[in-house]
Image (spheres, rainbow, N blue to C red):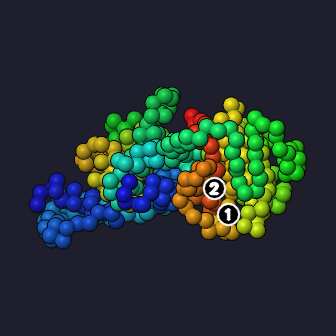
């Protein structure tokens, strides 16, 4: 380890610089705070052991995110009970006319994300974190760029639909509860 | 430029983290002027920007637990096996009699010399089974310090408060069951001491560890590894 003096300093710098982002990612992937804490912790434990693999500190964030996704996948493979919506028939573009932009809250968004299969959920999370390029996402997921873009487009359509449905339900409920 | 390239560039142009090559912008403009389909896609994308902003800010709206990073660091470094396992502690001296710190003399397998300190500290011997217990014991004695986490506290023989450089400091003594390995540790807070950071090879080897704001001066005999925690 040469780039940061000592392993300890390096790992400390990684924790200081990336804990929050990794935790958010873990939370969005898993949908639960405890799982997010555990996953984030696991990432740094692994990073500490594999630090020699990180040659350029500029790649640290992508590297840590990749470790996190692998750790997450490793976990969910054990529990196959989760049910997801199918995106097989989803077009990449839908005509929304003048549909208003829904007001999205964090929990609502999580509920919508939880329904997406992981291969769609991951790019959409990374996309909205803004600091990753399509190329970064493709590398992290180890798929071609085109695949990322197509999955992203379809995932966004499903997200929009599911958030709009939620908004409709909320609106009609609110109306029903009046007078 | 064909439609496929135009759509790809449009997608890229929407991202803060992507930068379009200036050389690509003009051909794209030309294509959009000439191609109603792509122009519509561009318009739609512009409209989607509001949706993206709404989702984006909700996506990042995840409260991060306070104190977790600090706890994690403690876990990462407080229980680190690697640093310690590398130690090759080859102390040739197999003598069972050895002097420990300036604060006292310790004899094993001989008529035991009992100091007043021994008598004073006897009641806590065996009480503390981990570093946290020792810390809270010392805190009750008015000494707010952090004991080294790397030792196996089931081998803790005594906790004392001794005078060192005219200050009260904690001294922890660990002895393995066969009594061939022993170590006394002076806990020297950096806020009070500016200690050297090199190991000292003398009759009794002294290992110096600087960690978490403390210098731990470890006076040891035998293989120090025998006193350290076995990590799983
Ligand atoms: Zn076109």
Q: Position of residue A107 (x, y in %)?
A: 57, 51
Quadrant housing the N terminus of chain A: bottom left
Q: Could you tell me which residue is drawn at 32 percent across and 53 percent down?
A: A55
Asked if B24 appears above or below A2 in the picture, the reply is below
Label 1: how many residues lie within 10 Å, few (<14), some (14-19) or many (20+)? many
Query: Residue at left 33%, top 37%?
Result: A89
Residue denoted by label 2: B217
Q: Nearer the viewer, residue B45 or B138?
A: B138
Q: Name the residue under label 1.
A: B189
**Residue A20 shown left or right of residue A57 in the figure:** right
- Which badge, 2 or 1, comes first in the chain's sequence? 1
Residue A103 can be seen in this image: no
- Callouts 2 and 1 in the same chain: yes
Question: Which image quarter holds the C terminus of chain A?
Answer: bottom right
Count every numbered label the image shows and give the total: 2
Along the horizontal axis of the image, is B157 left or right of A25? right
The residue at the point 83 percent across, 44 percent down is B113
Q: Is mark 2 on a helix, strand or loop?
A: strand
Residue drawn 70% across and 50% down? B100
Q: Tell whether circle 2 marks a residue whose Cβ is less than 8 angstroms from ligand 1.
A: no
């Amino acid at each position: 380890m040469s780039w940061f003096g000592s392993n300890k300093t390096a790992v400390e710098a990684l924790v200081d610089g990336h804990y929050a982002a990794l935790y958010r990612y873990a939370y969005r992937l898993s949908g639960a705070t405890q799982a997010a804490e555990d996953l984030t912790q696991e990432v740094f434990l692994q990073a500490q052991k594999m630090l020699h693999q990180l040659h350029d500190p500029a790649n640290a964030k992508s590297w840590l995110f990749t470790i996190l996704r692998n750790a997450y996948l490793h976990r969910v493979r054990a529990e196959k009970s989760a049910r997801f919506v199918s995106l097989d028939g989803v077009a990449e573009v839908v005509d929304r006319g003048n549909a208003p932009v829904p007001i999205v809250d964090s929990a609502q968004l999580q509920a919508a994300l939880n329904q997406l299969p992981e291969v769609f959920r991951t790019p959409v999370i990374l996309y909205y974190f803004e600091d990753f390029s399509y190329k970064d996402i493709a590398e992290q997921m180890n798929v071609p760029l085109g695949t990322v873009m197509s999955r992203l487009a379809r995932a966004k359509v499903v997200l929009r639909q599911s958030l709009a449905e939620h908004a409709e339900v909320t609106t009609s409920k609110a109306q029903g509860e009046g007078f | 430029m064909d439609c496929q390239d135009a759509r790809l560039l449009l997608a890229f142009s929407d991202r803060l983290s992507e930068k379009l090559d200036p050389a690509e912008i003009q051909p794209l403009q030309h294509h959009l002027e000439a191609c109603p389909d792509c122009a519509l896609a561009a318009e739609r994308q512009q409209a989607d920007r509001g949706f993206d902003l709404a989702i984006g800010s909700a996506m990042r709206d995840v409260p991060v637990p306070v104190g977790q990073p600090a706890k994690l660091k403690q876990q990462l470094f407080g229980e680190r096996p690697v640093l310690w396992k590398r130690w090759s502690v080859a102390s040739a001296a197999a003598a069972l009699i050895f002097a420990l710190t300036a604060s006292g003399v310790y004899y094993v397998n001989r008529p035991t010399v009992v100091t007043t300190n021994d008598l004073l500290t006897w009641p806590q011997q065996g009480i503390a089974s981990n570093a946290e217990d020792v810390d809270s014991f010392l805190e009750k004695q008015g000494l707010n310090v952090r004991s080294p986490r790397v030792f196996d506290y089931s081998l803790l023989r005594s906790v004392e408060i001794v005078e060192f450089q005219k200050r009260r400091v904690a001294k922890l003594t660990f002895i393995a069951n066969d009594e061939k390995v022993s170590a006394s540790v002076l806990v020297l807070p950096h806020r009070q001491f500016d200690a050297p950071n090199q190991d000292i090879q003398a009759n009794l080897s002294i290992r110096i560890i600087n960690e978490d704001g403390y210098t731990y001066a470890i006076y040891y005999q035998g293989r120090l590894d025998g006193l350290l925690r076995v990590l799983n």
